[in-house]
Amino acid sequence: MSNIPSDLKYASSHEWSRLEDDGTVTVGITDHAQDALGDLVFVEVPEAGQTVAAEDACAVVESVKAASDVYAPISGEIIEGNADLADRPELVNDDPYGEGWLFKLRPDNADDLDNLLDADDYEASLED
Amino acid sequence: MNLKPEKPNQLIFEHSRAGRRAYAQAPLQAPEASGIPAELRRSSPVGLPEASEMDVVRHYTRLSQKNFSIDTHFYPLGSCTMKYNPRACNTLAMLPGFLGRHPLAPETHSQGFMACMFELQEILKEVTGMAGVSLTPMAGAQGEFAGVAMIQAYHAARGDTQRTEILVPDAAHGTNPATATQCGCKTVEIPTNDQGDVDVEALRQAVGPQTAGIMLTNPSTLGVFERQIGEIQKIVHEAGGLSYYDGANLNAILGKVRPGDMGFDVIHMNLHKTFSTPHGGGGPGSGAVGVSKRLLPFMPIPVVGLTDDRGGAEATSHISHLTSHGIYRWLDEQDLPQTIGRLSAFAGNAGVLLRAYIYARLLGREGMHRVAEFATLNANYLMVELQKRGFDVAYKGRRASHEFIITLKRQKQALELTATDVAKRLLDYGFHAPTIYFPLLVPECLLIEPTETESRETLDAFVDAMVTIWDEAKADIEQVKAAPYTMPVRRLDDVRAARELDLRWQGNE
């Protein structure tokens, strides 16, 4: 089964979020999502400075099967998009929770992360 | 010794040798480029391939033999309605009177062609239950564009400028949200419930004074008929929105139920699907639109009109004995001042529309009914036979429309057998692959549409091939993973092709 680290928060639309020590939040797509999409051929990440609301579409991942929007899990300001993905979209497939992160944001309110799913709930949402 | 003198995938440019000609077709004297100023004339050769007639004939004959088409293979490409294109339609549409007609010829010289177009409009009105039809859109996408543009024009004409949202169920065709965006609307996605129907509660929440309309594909891309169609209509209409029927799957209901009777305001029909004009090579297509009474003034032009007025200037005497009904004429901005306008230089793809007209006339009213009956019978037969042999249907307990979905989720988990693997291996067994990985809602899916023109023996052979592939995967998955074996090219690296896009032929070097 897919890898679902217990220290991350999840959205039912298959994004993971990690609160970093400096108060920023790193966002990517889950192992399940990259597996369902198949080999990515194109990734578009948001630009720094853009403000996003929770559930705003703010990145695009495209595989040979499908193109899919990635949604901001919480509201905040984008501080960085992963520039490496432009040339190496396969990082998302190879290392979805590491080098394949999509963007970092500064949350309006870090407590918003509590509204997201924990690993067990996310795993349960994949069962059906 | 060279046993393979002809490389398998040579381009015509690679056959080129300087000065080689097809002399039989060369003009005796090169024509003068008279009237074109010298500075605008080409001074260097065009760079076209130079080959002998025999080389050209062999090259293109070989290419045609590689073609995987409805004329050579079963083609169950879901959502595309790859039915047989009757030869009679081709032959009749190629009659010299049709072929030689210039699109700018006066109406008096086009009455025969215009009569065909008028009758096609009438046939499509009858079969969809709509109040008017325009044949102008050149393809499905343009038909959709025309449909949403008419919805916008209707709201604008009433001064209702707040309606900017188009509702699109997530089981709709991917072109629907694209169309809404192209027209400057915001797309609001409506979820589907686990039975494959639109989530009516979610729809109720989504409508409001901002709703321009809904775009509904019915039967949906899940291969099921929307059971709450009446309720959906009511919700959208009560909110002041209009309803758009994506007719891509019209084959399932042709002559059986009519979108006009369901209360729809606009429909586009893919004549290259349902009305059997050739497609699959990129067109040309036809996306004729039908409209309800309130959208009649906004139809794209030109539309063929029929007038009994024989005293008009164009009504010459030699016409009136050709047709006892009256004079056909092109309706334009004068007749439809609120039209959304023109979508092409003339009136759609004339040759395609003629083929659709002839197809409809060959079928007649009874034949139309049989299209839907046999399209759905074939789909349901194939679905049940595959189920009997162990395959999983995505929406169990739902009757298929003209297409259905098999999911290989279980086979992927157990054997790593994917929809791509099955699609590639089917080619070796002489079957075009079904649509795969669409709709996105179903994992590892095959969307299978046999159409009405296939025999039971063909369907049985397809089922046998599917079972054989599954057995092969159980015995040795790598054998299936490496398919196809018998095609001009083996398994393509589509990931690398997409990541390192290379569209330019660089020559022989």
Image (cartoon, coloured by chain):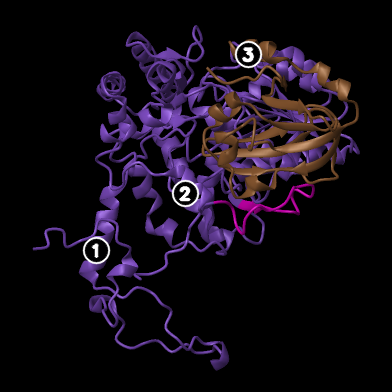
Chain colours: A brown, B purple
- For the residue marked with disc 3, what is the amino acid? Glu
Q: CA distance from mark 3 to mark 1?
A: 60 Å
Q: Quick check: can you spot residue B137? A: yes
Instruction: Characterize the local packing of mark 3: few (<14), some (14-19) or many (20 or more) Cα atoms within 10 angstroms.
Output: some
Q: Main secondary structure of the magenta part?
A: loop
Q: Which residue is mark 1?
A: B57
Q: CA distance from mark 1 to mark 2?
A: 30 Å
- For the residue marked with disc 1, what is the amino acid? Val
> Are callouts 3 and 1 both on one chain?
no
Contact flag, marks 3 and 2 (Cβ < 8 Å)? no
Q: Residue furthest bottom?
A: B38
Q: Which residue is mark 2?
A: B497
In which quadrant will I find the C terminus of chain B?
bottom left
Q: Which residue is mark 3?
A: A123
B52 relative to B291, above or below: below
- For the residue marked with disc 2, what is the amino acid? Ala
Q: Which residues are magenta?
A: B329-348
Where residue B117 sits in the image (x, y, percent)?
53, 46
B238 sits to left or right of B425: right
Residue B477: assigned label: none
Q: Name the front one of labels 3 and 1.
A: 3
> Are callouts 3 and 2 both on one chain?
no
Q: Secondary structure at mark 1?
A: helix
B118 relative to B127, above or below: below
Name the residue rendered at 66%, 62% in the picture: B313
Contact flag, marks 1 and 2 (Cβ < 8 Å)? no
Letter of the chain that mark 2 sits on in the rendering: B
A104 sits to left or right of A88: right
> Which of the two residues, B502 or B74, is positioned nearer the viewer here?
B502
> Are callouts 1 and 2 both on one chain?
yes
